[in-house]
Image (tube, helix red, strand yellow):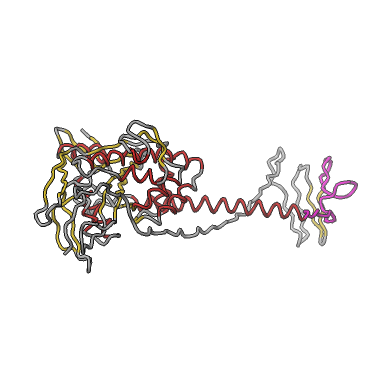
Amino acid sequence: MRKPIDPNLNGRSNDNLFEVTGAETVKANEPEFKVTEKEGVAKTVNSQNNTGAKPSETSAESGEHKSSSGSSHHHHSSSGSSHHRSSGSSRHHSSHGSSHSHHSHSSSKKKLPTTAKIAIGIIAAILLAIAVAVSAFFVFRHMGKKDMMPETSDTGYQETIEYKGHTYKYNADIISMGFIGVDKRTFETVDNTDFVGAADADIVVAIDTKTGKTKVVAIPRDTMIDIDIYSPESGVLLRTQKAQLCLAYSYGDGATKSCESTIDAMSRILYNVPIRKYFSLNLEGIAPLNDAIGGVKLTSISDFPDQGFNKGQEVTLLGDKAEAYVRTRSMTDLEASLDRTKRQVQYVKAYSAQVLPAVVKDFSTVNKLYGTARDYSQTNISLGNTTYLASLLLQKGVTDFETYTIEGKMKSRADTLMPGVVHAEFYPDEDSVMQTVLDVFYTKVK
């Protein structure tokens, strides 16, 4: 059995943030296009004379002659030939005496030059490519939406909540995702550990698909909650015990099982609201994603003398500076992890504020970022999901989101089995959690 380890106050000066392994790649089926042509039917209505007589009928095979009394039109059919003339009429439907013939087949057709044919072919190809791209986009978008809509039947959430004299109903239009920052480093001070990493950043993003309104809940990584502990050899669930949220990742497989265990723990903290999708990012992925949008500009809320900037200074984070900003914390301050959570939320907001305009300018940015992240991430969010979410936010004109932080108290506890190891534990305020859950996931009905 692995040792229950928490790196919070073990004397280390720094603590890293994110990690993950390969993401899934979704391949959309190529759409099938069918073009159905319908024959147009032209109807000619002959004018009737004052007596109301119907148009005359002619049978070419029998040579039968029919005329309508008083009609100005005369139809005559003779075996082997046919001509139409109108008695006393200025209109003549025969070639006799007329310079215009309606029975001429001698007119020549002009052929298109080769260059014109090539141009038409190129235009047709471009139009087809556009049609395929647009169709693929909508197919991806539809598939992404269908896959992301919450399935609440298998969770323990409450559809209706009575709280402080008001009634709240769960908003089924909300999509929830867990974003996990993982540090997979092995503890340098511990021997023979099978530590697979810790979820040092834990954020829940909730998007209302009807309005596009987006809300972000930052959960302290040291929040005490029941976590699932799995066997590292067989992957079998061994037991559930109360521990820090960050360790929900540690007692998994370092991949899918760890991510699922972490979002399950997040859900328990938030009174079992459904969280089906997750995206975890390792330490090495911060700089590439940060630099992919040209860096992130913000005003520092902490001092970073080693990085060349201090609290209150406006800075554009690039490379290692971005990693340091979201990772670094003091190991001597009990509140350090809470301060780091504030920086992480600030960074996510600043990053989002720069990504959205980039996507508006070039929607392929979504694919590029997804491709960059896959080398550093573990996720069940497909490219179709990402396409749907990006198009939804653009369609609804979303440029910002509300942030929520759960209040509570930090406490320290010395480990009885490992001398010198001190655990930091966060105990959330129940009213703070309930109000956050109602504000983000529910709608007041009375």
Q: Is residue 361 visible?
A: yes
Q: Is residue 77 left or right of residue 311?
A: right
**Which residue sits at x=24%, y=36%?**
439
Q: Is residue 158 visible?
A: no
**Which residue sits at x=35%, y=59%?**
21
**Which residue sits at x=19%, y=52%?**
6
* Towards the viewer: 13 or 31: 13
Q: Position of residue 231 (x, y in %)?
A: 20, 65
Q: Is residue 79 left or right of residue 316?
A: right
In the image, residue 412 above or below residue 22? above
Q: Position of residue 62 (x, y in %)?
A: 76, 62
In the image, residue 337 above or below residue 232? above
Q: Position of residue 423 (x, y in %)?
A: 15, 49
Q: Position of residue 121 (x, y in %)?
A: 68, 55
Q: To which quarter of the image does residue 419 belong?
A: bottom left
* Towards the viewer: 49 or 300: 300
Please state the total of marks drawn on the protein image: 0
**Which residue sits at x=40%, y=53%?**
373
Q: Which residues are magenta?
A: 85-113
Does the magenta segment cover residue 251?
A: no
Q: Is residue 151 left or right of residue 297?
A: left
* The furthest residue to the right: 97
Q: Main secondary structure of the magenta part?
A: loop
* The furthest residue to the left: 416
* Towards the viewer: 175 or 353: 353
